Image: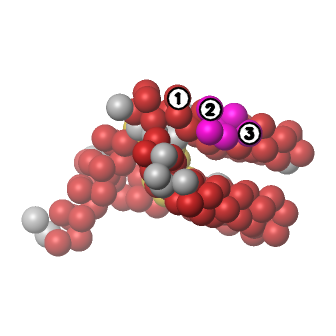
Amino acid sequence: MRLLGNIMWFFLGGWLLFIAYSLAAIIFFPVFLPLFRVARYALWPFGRAVVTQSDLKKYRAIKGLPADDGEVLKAIGGILNIIWMLTFGWLLALTHIVAAFFNLCMFFLIFTIPNIGGNWKMIRIAFMPFNKVIVPQELAEEIDLVISKANLNL
């Protein structure tokens, strides 16, 4: 099902989003790699999810896995997020909102319905891509579950 969703996403504009994110990554060449990961995510979004660095750090601490101390990188990521929001972030987030709206208008074509959720899912990372990690959907669900259980002391 994920493969089918990704194929439909690709043909209904995913390739255009990939080009837009890739151009933004080229313009912001010092941080090309994290932005190109987002561009690949924009090309095939189904089956993967976005997790914040802080949630990943909590998950590693709870599971007893080695964690890196990236406080300096977190601060740099925050500054880069602000710069990104003022330049490309709001444009790409607006693109996803408009695409979701047009897919919603075409709901009678059943195959556009998954793209609505895909676009809503992409808004968060389009607006602030730094300090985020793209992981498989199953791992993202496990991270949420483990952190929720730890917060409830289960």
Mark 1–mark 2 distance (CA, rounded to whole Å): 6 Å
Quadrant containing the N terminus is top left
Circle 3 Cα neighbour tier, 10 Å, few/some/many (<14 / 14–19 / ≥20):
some
Q: Left of 126 or right of it: where is 141?
A: left
Q: Amino acid at mark 2?
A: Phe
Q: Magenta span covers which residues?
A: 11-16
Q: Which residue is mark 2?
A: 11
Q: Are the residues tagged 1 and 2 within 8 Å (C-beta)?
A: yes
Q: Is residue 7 magenta?
A: no
Q: Are the residues tagged 2 and 3 within 8 Å (C-beta)?
A: no
Residue 85 rendering spot, x and y as whole percentages: 75, 66
Q: Which residue is most to the left?
A: 154
Q: What is the secondary structure assignment of the residue under circle 3?
A: helix
Mark 2–mark 3 distance (CA, rounded to whole Å): 9 Å
Labelled disc at residue 32: none
Q: Residue at x 30, y 50 (%)?
A: 141
Residue 66 rendering spot, x and y as whole percentages: 38, 43
Q: Left of 83 or right of it: where is 46?
A: left
Q: Which residue is mark 3?
A: 16
Q: Which residue is mark 1?
A: 7
Q: Is residue 15 magenta?
A: yes
